[in-house]
Amino acid sequence: MTCIKIVVSLVAAAALAGCNKDNQTATPDANNAVAKAPVVLPPSIAASKTYRCGDNSVVFVDWLTDNKTANVRTDATGSPTQVVSAEAGKPLTGTGLSLTGTAAGSSITLERAGHGTQTCHV
């Protein structure tokens, strides 16, 4: 029994010896660029619409609030392809896709590989 007490005491002493007792206060560094940078949140979804295209295919578009980004899916549960534009009102482009339209409109023009350019309606 005495041996167990000694072992427990040694383990406790070793655990406490590993503690750093220096003053560790979290203060932002005045020269730290990360601490000075403003926080910019990603855009949220402004509208989600389903479009029927001329070849009878269906396209799902999530329009984002920055008016320069959209997520396009060709399958309801598929992975989205993000399309972006340098400025609002210009065509949105991404991997194999080009999209012209707005969240407020009822139709889009979509260009994608294997389907050409077609107009799609809500």
Image (cartoon, grey):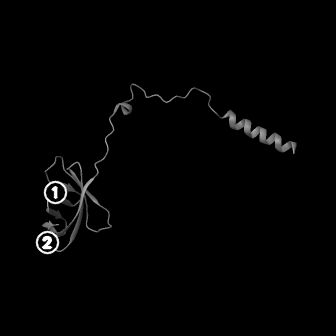
- Which quadrant of the structure image shows residue 29? top left
Q: Is residue 117 visible?
A: no
Quadrant assignment for the N terminus: top right
* Mark 1–mark 2 CB contact (< 8 Å): no
Q: Secondary structure at mark 2?
A: loop
Question: Which residue was labeled with disc 1?
Answer: 104
The residue positioned 16% from the left and 48% from the top of the image is 88
Q: Amino acid at mark 1?
A: Ala
**Most foreground residue, 111 or 16:** 16
Q: Is residue 20 visible?
A: yes
Residue 57: x and y in percent read: 20, 72
Quadrant assignment for the C terminus: bottom left
Q: Amino acid at mark 2?
A: Gly
Decide if residue 26 is on the left or right side of residue 32. Answer: right
Relative to 77, residue 46 above or below: above
Decide if residue 103 is on the left or right side of residue 37. Answer: left
Decide if residue 74 is on the left or right side of residue 36. Answer: left
Residue 34: x and y in percent read: 37, 33
Relative to 6, residue 77 above or below: below
